[in-house]
Amino acid sequence: MNDLNSIIIEGNLTQEPEMKYTTNGTAMCSLSIAVNRYYKSGEETKRETAFLDVECWGRIAESCSQYLSKGRGIRIVGRLKQDRWEQDGYTRSKVIIVAENVEFKPERQQSKQEYAHA
């Protein structure tokens, strides 16, 4: 029996998507997203931001590379993957989200004032 490894996360891209191809031609797109959590501390509303790395593969990777740009909102359904490696005699690790589905949120529209100054 498999343990449950599923995540749904929504945030904004912090940089442009980075497209790569494996030696056998499989598309892989790396994304970095910021996810905000708001909470109350007394009378003050505070924000906590997490920065997360995402991998997309195949057709999802190609779509993300083509249509996404920095600042765009996305919702990701996927799983967690832990990469481990040795560096300077120490074992290092990093948790990455592997996207199984990516939804693009509508692009932000400029206000009328922003158009006037553009």
Image (cartoon, rainbow, N blue to C red):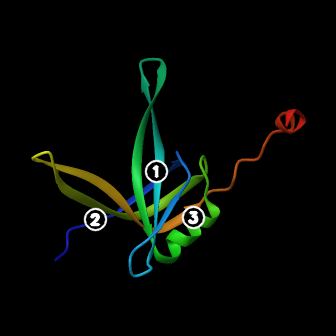
Q: Residues within 10 Å of mark 2 (few under 14, many from 20)?
A: few
SS at circle 1:
strand
Mark 3 crowd level (few <14, some 14–19, many ≥20, 10 Å Cα): many
Is 20 situated above or below 115?
A: below
Q: In the rendered image, which residue does mark 1 sit on?
A: 32
Q: In the rendering, at what x and y percent does residue 103 appear?
A: 56, 64
Q: Position of residue 92 (x, y in %)?
A: 18, 49
**Precedes in sequence: disc 2 or disc 3:** 2
Q: Residue 89 at x, y = what percent? A: 9, 47
- Tag 3 residue: 65
**Is residue 35 rendered to the left or right of residue 105?**
left
* Residue at numbered disc 2: 5
Label 3 vs 1, first from the N-terminus: 1
**Closer to the eye: label 1 or 2:** 1
Under mark 2, the amino acid is Asn
- Toward the right, the furthest residue is 116
- Secondary element type, mark 2: loop
- The vertical placement of 60 against 90, above or below, is below
Count of all numbered marks drawn on residues in the image: 3
Q: Position of residue 58 (x, y in %)?
A: 47, 76
Residue flagged by tag 3: what amino acid is it? Ser
Residue in the image at 39% along x and 65% along y = 78
Mark 1 Cα shell of 10 Å, populated few (<14), some (14-19), many (≥20): many
Work out which residue is located at the far bottom of the displayed protein and give it: 24
Residue at the spot x=90%, y=35% of the render? 116
